[in-house]
Image: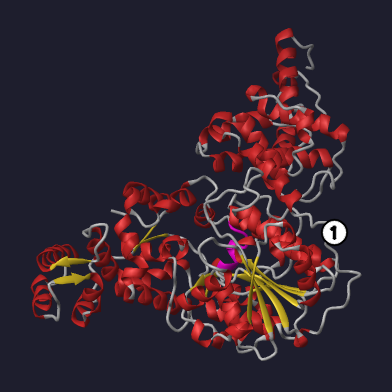
Amino acid sequence: MVKPFTTKAGLAALEYSLKAGVSQISPVDVDIDALGNNMLAPWLTTYLGDIMKSSRNTRRYSNVAKWESDSDSLWRELRISDDSYEARYAVTKPFVAQIIERLLKLDDELLPNESLQDLGLDSLMMIEMKSSLQGLIGSAGIIRVADLAEWQTLHLTTVAIVNIMFPKTSGREYAKLVERNKLIKDDSMLWETTNAANLLQEVPISSVKIVLLTGCTGTVGPYVLHQLSRLPQIQSIYCLVRSHQVSSGRDRVLCRLKELNLLSTCKIEKIITIDGDVVSEHLSLKLLLYHQLASGVEAVFHCAAQTSHMEMYGRSSSSNIGLRATNVTGTQNILQFACSTRRKHLYNASSLLATWLPANRQDNYLGYPETFPKDGDFDEAPSHGYGITKFIVDRLVCQAVERGLPVKSFRFPLICGDSMTGRKTNLGVDHFFLEFIYFVMKCTIPDIILPLHLLPVDVAVRVTLKLFFDENVPSGMFNITNPHARNFTDVGMLSEEFGRILRLAEIFYKNLDNVGNSLGRHDVFRIMSNFARNEGVDQEEILYILQHGDFNGEITCQEILNEPNIRTLLRKGLDTPFSKVPHDDFVAQMQREGNGSVLYKWLDYYSRDDAPTRHMANGTLPLYSKWVENMESFQLATCAKMRQYIPNVEELIPDPLETIRTDLQYAIDNIDSSLGNLFRANK
């Protein structure tokens, strides 16, 4: 019954053994027919049937028998899967996990981000792991034992295996990922000289009178400056401003306050501007001045940031400008200043985009955590340069807190315009607001389930300052977001109100030359007639309004949009239904529009393989299932600390849609300065 191997059968058994990926195997050649129907065949059938049943009901392969080798199973599943990198990763990951679990004799499921060395992987095991993984992929590529030292987790190992098997389609994702994560780890190390442990004790927060502010000409900084100046306890606000050839630092600060309509209510006598730069050693100040400030300043408000959504994070980044310089090196310098001469309170402006949780920690939270991140938390996150820098900043601040610095770090959401007026500036680079403009204008949006994390800028700053100056609020991380639950696609509810108006403005400006802001009556009548016909608006009524309206010979877009009867007519009905489309269809639409789209400069943000919006659409963001299950509970849990220390905070914060509505109305009421030039440029 048990027969000697033939040469052919022996070679087949050897090939199978090398590819099987098991630590022990014993090939046997048995003549089943010779066993007879009444001998072992029934027992063997039952036994092997039990093995197969067990294999289906557990995550482990049987170590007794296998009907199909790991390698055969892997390649069979890969052949029937999509050709995308994500699909190949999903197919390969369980096979890699089974090899590692058997090797480490794990009883529990191996999670993607667990350290293999912490689980017991040593150099001898790496040799066996290399053999098993090589057997898994066969002749598709070469695995070296030396490579395994870099493959520190199941996730990284799977990425590497997929890249080896499909080098042409997956490119150099693994190499880039390893390089990126190593850079994140290196840049997340707080300088050794930054230590507050042995410094003079900080003054009580209620006694802070002299402060230093960075980022005072940016988005959040001017509102921090304005509200600080109105606090009776604050006597002096030193504003660190980069030098400028044309205007002084003080002129730049006052000009920014005036631009935001804050100057008239700001206590400007408290403002002291100093030329400096966060990216330079000693903040680019003379050493004497640096030490004088370090001795006198009692609190630092760090709002300086570069917020580009297109810049990638890498070692080749400039040391003077850009994300890495401003956000990372700048924070290192500010933390060092806060720990110089005397210990200072620190207000740090962070971002919700820095939040990422590995799979093995997501079950512990009902909303985004309000804790400092751990080393390695961002390893599986998309390569979003701004989010990476803010994660690194959070890690740096965490270490500063551990060394004795009193810090309150605030993760801001999407920052919108003033809560009362909707006033916004620099809309040409305001990516997320232009996203809302695009959705409303085009009556389309990616079909994504995602909470609308946004706040008016003045409200966000007011909330953070309440927390910062409250002596009962300890150092730590605080999520500053909207407690009112709204889904991303709810933006479509504003399309009926604003869609036609924005489309009319776009057409008007695309008919202008590069200089003027007005058109002759004949051109305006032609544009309005064509627009009414295409939009299903009563042509005769709209032309009647133009003929009898109070218009001069030359007519501006603002005059048309300000005409009450035209505005009412444009808001009647909606012939273009608002549609939720798959993410890839949305990207394809933008690609077809080319540079005619207001989002054209951010096309790569949506189209690249690891685009944040692709993670949103695929449901692979951390805690996705939590907000899908109950978005209201998720939002409340995300800002739990804010709600704990400011019980009426939900009354202070408006509904997200109301905030967007206010901003859209401001943009329309100030169309020349807000969107006009942008529409004109996208002809």
- Tell me if residue 563 can be seen: yes
Q: Residue at x 65, y 22 (%)?
A: 139
The segment highlighted magenta reads 621-627
Of residues 184 and 110, the one nearer the viewer is 184
Q: Is 235 placed left or right of 120 in the picture?
A: left
On screen, 290 above or below 162? Answer: below
- Examine the image and state in which quarter residue 281 appears: bottom right
Q: Give the residue at the far bottom of this rendering.
A: 232
Q: Residues within 10 Å of mark 1 (few under 14, many from 20)?
A: few
- Tell me if residue 58 can be seen: no
Q: Is 227 placed left or right of 15 in the picture?
A: left
Q: Residue at x 67, y 36 (%)?
A: 160
Where residue 10 sits: x, y (%)? 75, 13
- Examine the image and state in which quarter residue 161 appears: top right
Where residue 180 sits: x, y (%)? 67, 45
Residue tagged by mark 1? 193
Of residues 230 and 65, the one nearer the viewer is 230
Of residues 20 and 137, the one nearer the viewer is 137
Where residue 536 sits: x, y (%)? 16, 67
**Would residue 625 be counted in the magenta stretch?**
yes
- Examine the image and state in which quarter residue 288 appears: bottom right
**Tag 1: amino acid:** Thr
